[in-house]
Image (cartoon, rainbow, N blue to C red):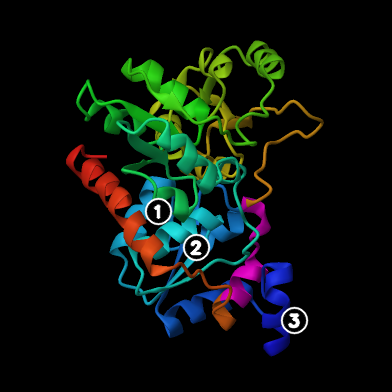
Amino acid sequence: METYLTELNAKGYIDAPIDPTLDLVDEINKLKKEKNAVILAHYYQESEIQDIADYIGDSLGLSQQAAKTEADIIVFAGVHFMAETAKILSPEKKVLLPDLKAGCSLSDSCPPHLFAKFKEQYPDHLVITYVNCTAELKALSDIVCTSSNAVQIVESLPLDQPIIFGPDRNLGDYVRRKTGRDLVLWNGACMVHEIFSQDRIEQLKREYPQAKFIAHPECEQELLAIADYIGSTTGLLKYTQKDPADTFIVATESGILHQMQKASPEKTFIPAPPNNACACNDCPHMKLNTLEKLYTCMKYEQPEIDLPMDVIIRAQRPIERMLELSDRLGL
């Protein structure tokens, strides 16, 4: 075990040998019971991880689950900022992440020390940050939001309240256009949602003229302008269940297609193509988590997410404000 811990920082995960005869799904379910652990998984995880999770959701739903779980251990099958959010909301619980290197390009695009200087330029502004950011950035915020509630949170604030919105400029621009508010935007973006090819999507729309094109608001404005529906990951999933169309072109990370197909097996889901040679659009960070890493993470209870208590205390309030507003707005 000592060797695995020594290698943990370099590798990002517990690289311990696994008996190839083990049924990992069986073993993980046993560990959940033995350790009173809950597995929270994001929609962008591999399908086999989604299928073993206790809860699958987007950032808002996962935050709500992390806040109310009675488990002793939260195993977060997602990326680093999500596990940090769980730790902020449940500091007394042990929070595990299968691979510490499961980061986020959007989170990386907004270093807290630079954002702090940016914030100083607008002393009278309230700071709303998208949940896809570090704990330190949340600690610099007044309210945290997700793509599920960003528009409603901004609309709930007084019209004369100036606002800084970060770190995603595309989501911020979408919120600005939906609300008519003059937001000051941080110039950050998600690599997954900026890679879609408009030309290739237009071509797909010609090939499938009856298909609905649906997109996440982290996509660029040019794509959102041609979308039949724009929504959070959960919003996109619900739309495909309710809309009578039988074919959908989906502009977000391709992991969500697993849940869409499960919910509507008779429908066809096409991942929107990126502007490279790949036929799909995967987040390389989300896909670092595997069933094997999930098993070793639970067995050895490492890697564990740990945060300074002062950061936890400062970051708690803006997240709690989001959860309170979401509850009040019925989100």
Dot 2 crowding, Cα within 10 Å, few <14, some 14–19, many 20+? many
Q: Residue at x 63, y 60 (%)?
A: 289
Report the front residue among 280 and 310. Answer: 310
Q: Which residue is mark 1?
A: 62
Decide whether residue 295 is among the magenta residues: yes
- Position of 195 with respect to 44 (left or right) is right
SS for dot 1: helix
Report the front residue among 311 and 71. Answer: 311
Dot 1 crowding, Cα within 10 Å, few <14, some 14–19, many 20+? many
What's drawn in magenta, residue-wise?
286-297
Residue 17, disc: 3
- Amino acid of disc 1: Leu
Quadrant of the image containing the C terminus: top left
Asked whether residue 230 appears in the rendered view, the answer is no
Q: Identify the mark nearer the N-term, 3 or 1.
A: 3
Q: CA distance from mark 2 to mark 3?
A: 22 Å
